[in-house]
Amino acid sequence: MKTFILIAVAALLATPALAQTAPTAPLAVEIPELERVTADPSCGGNTALQAQNVFCVTTTQAGVGAVVDAYSAAFSQQGWMAAGGSENRVVYVKRKESGGCDAFQMLAFADESRIAAPGAPAWLAFAAIPGDVCATQAAPAATNP
């Protein structure tokens, strides 16, 4: 396994794209090298992702499910917990010894301009989620009528 330091500028969103925000402190995540994936610095030619300093890998559309499962198992062994997400995104959270949590997300995507096919490329983008995702947010003040 190689250790990749992910520096991301992503915010937790409900949309399939990662949002650009202010730079955050690096988050050390061990991304295992898998036989069926290749690092892709261009993120499939996705300039929006490239601008956000995410780490991307490519595989096939037929293999992306198994790759996600392999990564999820590896992250679980490192103490990361899948804590949410959507159809094509998984959010992982890990408690810090000092309190609070670190988080990152794995986003799966394909080139929508190409025909979907088992051998067609699919990508996974990894990005840190800035801030403490476990911090409690203050409840809005109640108003009296």
Image: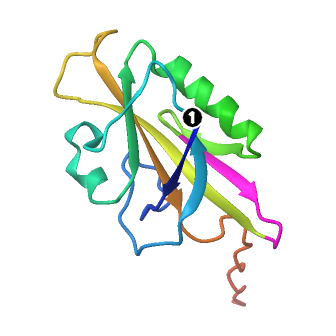
Give percent across and percent down for residue 113: 16, 28
Query: What residue appears at the point 31 percent right and 10 percent down from the top-left corner?
Result: 119
**What amino acid is at disc 1?**
Pro
Q: Quadrant of residue 53?
A: bottom left
Give percent across and percent down for residue 101: 72, 63
Query: What residue appears at the point 83 percent right and 67 percent down from the top-left corner?
Result: 97
- From this viewpoint, which residue is outermost toward the top? 118
Reply above or below: 38 against 11.
Answer: above
Q: Residues within 10 Å of mark 1 (few under 14, many from 20)?
A: some
Looking at the rendering, in which quadrant would you find the N terminus?
top right
Reply above or below: 73 against 13.
Answer: above
Tell me if 50 is positioned left or right of 138 in this view: left
Looking at the rendering, in which quadrant would you find the C terminus?
bottom right
Report helix, strand or loop for mark 1.
Answer: loop
Query: What residue appears at the point 25 percent right and 43 percent down from the top-left corner?
Result: 42
The answer to if 76 sits in the magenta stretch is no
Magenta segment main secondary structure: strand
Q: How many marks?
A: 1
Query: What residue appears at the point 51 percent right and 56 percent down from the top-left corner?
Result: 5
The answer to if 97 sits in the magenta stretch is yes
Tell me if 120 is positioned left or right of 56 in this view: left
Give percent across and percent down for residue 22: 40, 75
Q: Quadrant of residue 28?
A: bottom right
The residues colored magenta run 90-99
Give percent across and percent down for residue 84: 64, 44
Q: Nearer the viewer, residue 84 or 143?
A: 84
Reply above or below: 113 against 18.
Answer: above
| Residue that numbered label 1 is attached to | 32
